[in-house]
Amino acid sequence: MKGKNDRRAYLYVLPAVILVALFYYYPFLKSFVSSFFLQNQRGELTSFVFLDNYKATLTNEYFIASVKNTLTMMLFFVPANTILTLAAASFVRREKRVNEIIGSLYIIPMAFSMSLLALIFKQIFSPTNSIINRIFHLDIVWLNDRTSALFAIIALCVFLDFALDYILLLSAFRKIERNIIEASLIDGANEVQRYFLIELPQILPTLIMTIFLAVKDILLISAPIMLMTEGGPYRSTESVMFYYYIEAFKGSNRAAESTISSIMVLFSALLLALYSIIQRRRRHA
Amino acid sequence: MRKVVLIMLLLVIPTLLFSAGAKEEDVTTVTIWHSNSGILEDAFMSLVEQFNESHDNIRINAVYQGKANDVLTSVNAASLAGSGLPDIAQLDATAGLDMMYAPYLVTVEELGVDTSELIESAYAAYDSKRGHIGVPFNASSLLFYYNADLFEEAGVEVPKTLDDFISSAPIIHEKTGVYAFSGVPTTYELITFLGSQNGGTYLTDNRNGHDGVSTKVLFDENGTFRNFLEKWKALYDTGALNNLTSGVSNAFYAEQCASMLASSSNLTTVLENTDGLFNVGVAYVPMVDSDATGGVNIGGGCLAAFSNTEEVREVLEFMISASSQAYWAESTGYMPVNRNTVESPEWQAFIKENPLYSVALEQALSSSEKVLGLWIPSAYQVYYSFQSTIASVLEGEMSIDEAVSSMADMINTNLMEYARQNG
Amino acid sequence: MLKKLFAIALAIIVVFPLFYTASMSLFSPRDFNTSPALFFPTSPLWQNYEKAVNHSSFLRYTFNSVFTATLAAVMRTVIVTLSSYAFSFLSFKGKKAILFFLLLSAFIPQDSLLYQNYVTVSRMNLINTYLGIIITGLFSATQLIMLMTAMKSLSRDSYDAARVDGARDMTILCSIIAPLTKSIILTIMLQSFISTFNSYLWPLLVTNENAMRTIQIGVSLMGYQESGRLGPLFATLFIILVPFVILVITTRKFIIKALADGLSY
């Protein structure tokens, strides 16, 4: 078999190669190259300006604010998402009838698509008469200051990622081999010890994966912001990708478009590389 | 191997089948991208229907694309594609700069639309150095909406200037327990608040960008922004002003505030939502001080043409005709842009019956031509930046001087960046 | 006990938006403006449903969403399966380089290439087409890794035997390989379906005709919001939600299994 050339293989991989070339490498290279040039209305490169576009973008106060906002959201969303989904999966990890019923409620968020949920959340967090205020006896004018608006966006994101992460973690729990748990029972480990010392380490790879997915989701967040706050109030909830969207499509700002594209691709690539290293280390450890 | 090709084909075929609708012959379709939702959409669609019924050879295909600025986003996106532009788009002032330089735009003059019946100031709002970028269709002006019951309860007059409001707002707040006013001004309000000062001033040079891209802002050196901020801060310091940035109308309906500034186009919507709850009044926008006599700008939107055809001209002329404008204005609160509408006995009878509907037009007609929509790059972003800067001043995070220079710097930077990128 | 309470509290939070949508779908305009907010309508306004059904093209939106998501799922699965088969069982020149080329794409997030991809797709004249909505998402490097790992873990014996018998690739793939990796293939389909169904910005950009809009775009552009006609909006949302909630709950075992199977690789 070795050494022979199955030429039909090229046909099988061709669609994938074309798609990847056309919708991953080409746009990236085009953005990257354009980021060093000025462009005219038709998108043709006119003159080489080296780092001027980067200078213009990176010094823009709203871009800087959008980076800060994205990091803030990450700081709160990732732990909130991890704790809640882990808690949900932990609650119902044993296969019991009552757990099945509660567990089936936990995947309901999967039926909501993003924009439907955003519209509903917008009303739940209404600045005039929020049902949240009624339930918890609060007096917050939602979405009218940065903190409450960020909270609402993060709540929406948690809800959006909830079902998938819950399913992944639940499956990881249920895949733990029975004899590992039984062995610990013989050792006399109590419920809490068993959970933290035996089960949690077993699902760690999955947990790291859901954390990584959460980081990635929030890094690239834009649509939920568009629908919930439009970046407001006072442009205080703009994320990097939302900023990219309005500059590229509303502002026809080619310099911002090409530089942010390039920066974000490089940044996500670094992040993904980091993730692969972590997971590989674990596997070899 | 053949099977692979076959599978691929099977997958591609359905996508092609569903993609394009068949076109009827002999009927020219004129596509309009519009921004009318709710009550406005109902009224707009019945205009479209009227047109389609009375024209055998032309059919209007109206597509809602979101808010006015979203229509611009779709237009810009389609222009990148090089095809797929609509024949007509309903755009507002945020599109001014893009349209002035858009190679695909057909000016009103090039299209040869009969504009003789148009109210001059409404038409002048879309005047650029290359001609008129569109015909006014949904013309509106800023209005001061107030809860007449609450004003009566407090025993105060409707404010004519911000000075008046500074003295009456705390009374309203005290006597009724609700905020006297809700909202944070954006570009839309500031064109009036700044532009009306000293009998009418421009915010940026080149006639607010209508005579070519502005090179710098004027509101810093001429003191108008400072003057406004001082008054607005004084108003805020009374404690009767609520900095609400979204859901302002809902707060008004829920009687959480006694007044708000909003476009006249909201009039029917406001009346419908407050029906039976309380009496709504509308008045001229309070001016910054008694020297500010410039009035308001004519805002709202225009219909811009991207195809130079007889049919497009016919559609535009229909939309600005006396009868269409009468129907449109009466159902929404937009002001008629056709002189003959205003002079018609039907309109006179209508406003006698519904006096609130005449305020916007009277206000606009008594305004200076210098109070003009602002055509600058990144208009959408600037809109929110004004809000954030004003809020920072009110909350004491920024001094008035810092706010003036920060806002001027931001717009100047945008102008420079636009010049850098576009030569 | 405390744990149970938490579990139930979490369940209530998770279900709350669904309940509240149902309730708001019967609100009158005044109910929406009542402060403090209401849990239930003062008197159910069934007209909202009438308006929802009459006004909107939500059936069309739903069809578009389901159709594009199904189409994308099938096409992506075929494309990923074919290339995975080639990399797992065939040998050809440049195999490693091509694989590297494909897998490296996992490091490029398409979300940040929205603008350039829009320009490409619009120049291909795919604006307002179903193909345009799905074309950028028809390949996934992570799914290729998943399926390749599964295929490579299969024993080569049955493949070699079939080869000796002179079976064609398609026969081998369909009758031997695919059945053995069925669970992963289903995972890929489901993942692709969900991601296409939920995408928002991309379909917003590439469609500007009402008839081509997906649910995601359609409902956010229904224009009820700005004009304070919220009742019909939530009635529409509820009509769309109910079948999906039922679908998700009844097929949850399948969904959980399919999504979890992807985990092992």
Image (cartoon, rainbow, N blue to C red):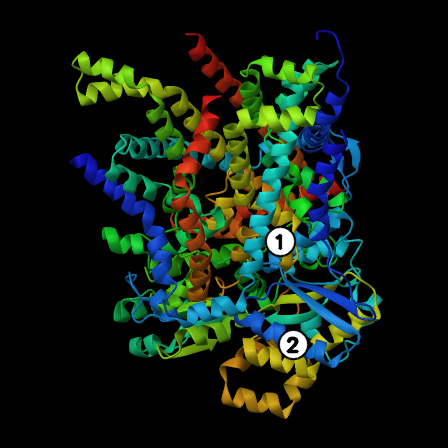
Total tally of numbered discs in the picture: 2
**SS of the residue under disc 1:** loop
Q: Is residue C50 visible?
A: yes
Quadrant housing residue C4: top left
* Residue B25 sits above or below residue B210 on the image: below
Gap in Å between the C-alphas at discs 2 and 1? 41 Å
Q: Label 1: how many residues lie within 10 Å, few (<14), some (14-19) or many (20+)?
A: some
Marks 2 & 1 on one chain = yes
Q: Is residue B293 visible?
A: no
Residue C96 in picture, x, y percent from top left: 68, 14
**SS of the residue under disc 2:** helix
Is residue A146 or residue A156 the one in the foreground? A156
Quadrant where the C terminus of chain A lies? top left
Quadrant housing residue B271: bottom left
Q: Chain of mark 2?
A: B
Residue C257 in picture, x, y percent from top left: 42, 32
Which three-letter amino acid code belongs to the residue tagged 2?
Answer: Leu
At horizontal 40% and vertical 69% (from top left) the residue drawn is: B259
Which three-letter amino acid code belongs to the residue tagged 1?
Answer: Leu
- Determine which residue is flagged by label 1: B218
Residue A186 in picture, x, y percent from top left: 18, 13
Closer to viewer: mark 2 or mark 1: 2
At horizontal 44% and vertical 59% (from top left) the residue drawn is: C239
* Residue B173 sits above or below residue A140 on the image: below
Task: Farthest residue to the front: give it.
Answer: C165
- Determine which residue is flagged by label 2: B47
Q: Is residue C67 left or right of residue B107?
A: left
Q: Is residue B49 left or right of residue A141?
A: right
Q: Report if the CB atoms under discs 2 and 1 are less than 8 Å apart.
A: no
Q: Is residue B77 left or right of residue C63?
A: right
Q: Chain of mark 1?
A: B
